[in-house]
Amino acid sequence: MLDLMRKNAGSWVVKALLGAIVVVFVFWGVGSWTSHQEGVVATVDGEAISRQDYTNEYNRLMDQVRQNFGAGITDEMLKSLQLETQALNQLIDRLLLKQAAARLDLRVADEELVRSIRGIPAFQSGGVFDPRRYQQMLPLNRLTPETFEMMQRDALLFAKLQRVITDSVKVSEAEVADWYTWSNAAVKIDHVPIASEKYAKITAAPEEVAQYFERNKESYRTEPELQARYLRFTPESYLDKVALTDAELRDAYDSAPERFAIPQTVEARHILVKVAPDAAPEAAEKAREQLADVLKQARAGKDFAALAKQYSEDSTREQGGALGAFRREAMIQPFADVAFSLKPGEISEPVRTRFGWHLIKVEKVNAGRTRSFEEVAPEIAIQLKGERARSLAYDDAEVVYDAASGTGDLAGAAAARKLALHTTDFFTRRGPVKGVPKAAEFAQAAFQLAPGEVSDIQDFGDGYTLLQVADSRPARIPELAAIEARVKQDAIREKQTEQAGKDARALLADVKNGAALEPAAKKAGLTAKTTDFFKRGESPPDLANEPEVTRAAFELSEREPLPAEPIKTSTGYSVIRFREKKPPAAGGLEAEKAQIQDRLLQQKKSKTWEAWLDQLRQSSEIVRKKDIAS
């Protein structure tokens, strides 16, 4: 069954790896999932993890680190990441989960796997699974279809297992109420901001600048830089090489006639009297009777648009209830069913929806039809030419890649085919890369390359690209003389902030000793302010983006109105004092209840899963080879 998905592969593909696939890679890893008894690195309840599996997993993690840090990775960073331990721990967890799934008799049928893979947008063309994309995309990401299908099957299996473990988790009404109260309580505080820039007269002597630089050298380390050469294969440049026959256009038309169907539409007006979905029967009936009286007026000959302006409670009121032309699926039922059953000029009986009661007057019915071949032939030609041009562009990129990847001579391969080879300026991992669309992606791809390596075929939004590193500059710490002005400014800022902290602590001490905040602040040349009420997830306008102030404010109370220390802010320091706290507004819980319940449920499920997995580890016999990881 799966083999059928891999047949009839073509020669073009968009080089991409979408989120659905990335999640699988990051969470479950890549590599052989078969265990061999020889070269065992660990056992889980007697089942072995092979050294080959461990090597594959370690290499995958190392690839991720290289992608994230490139040439900037150091031996110290690698050591701190403990990739050996991470690799083995992930393999152990996977094996634990597979064993647990087997004990629960959980399986993934071939039909489920096929449906999952066919549903991944990266493998689709026009919303339909494309075997060519599937066959071509995987090798570009160092995967075979067999390996990816095995990974995807296990990912589906683990998702099933997680649902079994967490589906019984519930969130109580009390938990929802407690969360609502905690997150919607509001506090008001007094605060005295002490900005570092207030101390404009502070300066730094040359020896202080030198000392500051010695203490903070690493913060001035430059990022690694690369210069790249690259070739572009744009579909536009291949359009004149594509010739289409009438038979090909006709085949494309006949193969999917539904694409050219124009559905039936109705042009109508309506009058709405609003009724809540959970309204009492008496209220709903009263609204219906009101609309029935309007219906009598309409059928007696009064202008429907004028009645809509007078009685309708919908946003279309000022337009006389005009809805324009709409498809059946654009409207909710039973509104759509009634509208599409009326003839032009007819007015419906009152129709109930979740919005209330409606009167509908159909003004025109536009019959559906299928556009003729002659109408759509130009559109089909544009689409097919674009697809064929992309295919030709990819084919040429593939030919050049094959020629250049073995020798590492991208320039030679370009010259042999008289292709324009471009060279960038130096750029960092974050870019910018001038003249390149999706510059950040270009930079990331360049930083993943080894010296002399020619990249896989890349798609940066303008066709296909092959690139190669032309030159590099390693990360380095500049000499002080080259950045002295910047270092001096930073040293002065540090001294200013230290002074702001001293003055803030002195002010807080005065207030704790009984001084009133406002006069004490004024005496120090500062200004005390009072905020409006704000919640935990908010900040007062003059304390925006200061989460530490918000956190500290909610730790204060009438009994403990002052913090132990001034609050460090992004601009200096702040001395705060509790003023007032108020609970959430009565009745607000209902509006947020569903959202809170869903958020808490996801949190509890995540914690339940982690706790179950930890218990699984504790109850299993896991034996690790000491020379691998501990």
Image: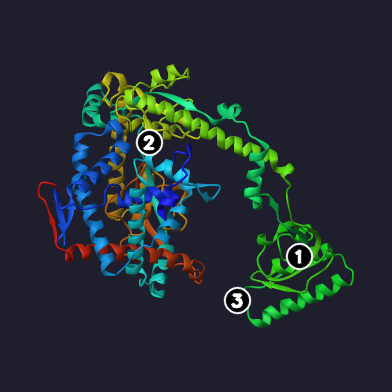
Gap between marks 1 and 3 measured at Cα: 22 Å
* Residue 165: mark in rendering: none
The amino acid at mark 3 is: Asp
Residue matched to label 3: 278
Q: Earlier in the sequence, mark 1 or mark 3?
A: 1
Residue 469 appears at what percent x and percent y?
35, 24
Q: Which residue is mark 1?
A: 270
Kind of residue indicated by mark 2: Lys
**How far apart, in angstroms, are the residues tagged by discs 1 and 2?**
64 Å
Which one is closest to the eye, mark 1 or mark 3? 1
Q: Nearer the viewer, residue 2 or 563?
A: 2
- Decide which of tag 2 and tag 3 comes sooner along the chain: 2
Indicate the secondary structure of the residue bearing disc 2. Answer: helix
Residue denoted by label 2: 198
Q: Position of residue 530 (x, y in %)?
A: 44, 53
Residues tagged 1 and 3 counted as in contact (Cβ below 8 A): no
* Local crowd size for mark 3, using a 10 Å CA cut-off: few (<14), some (14–19), many (≥20): few
- Mark 1 vs mark 2: which is more N-terminal? 2
Residues 549 and 538: in front is 538
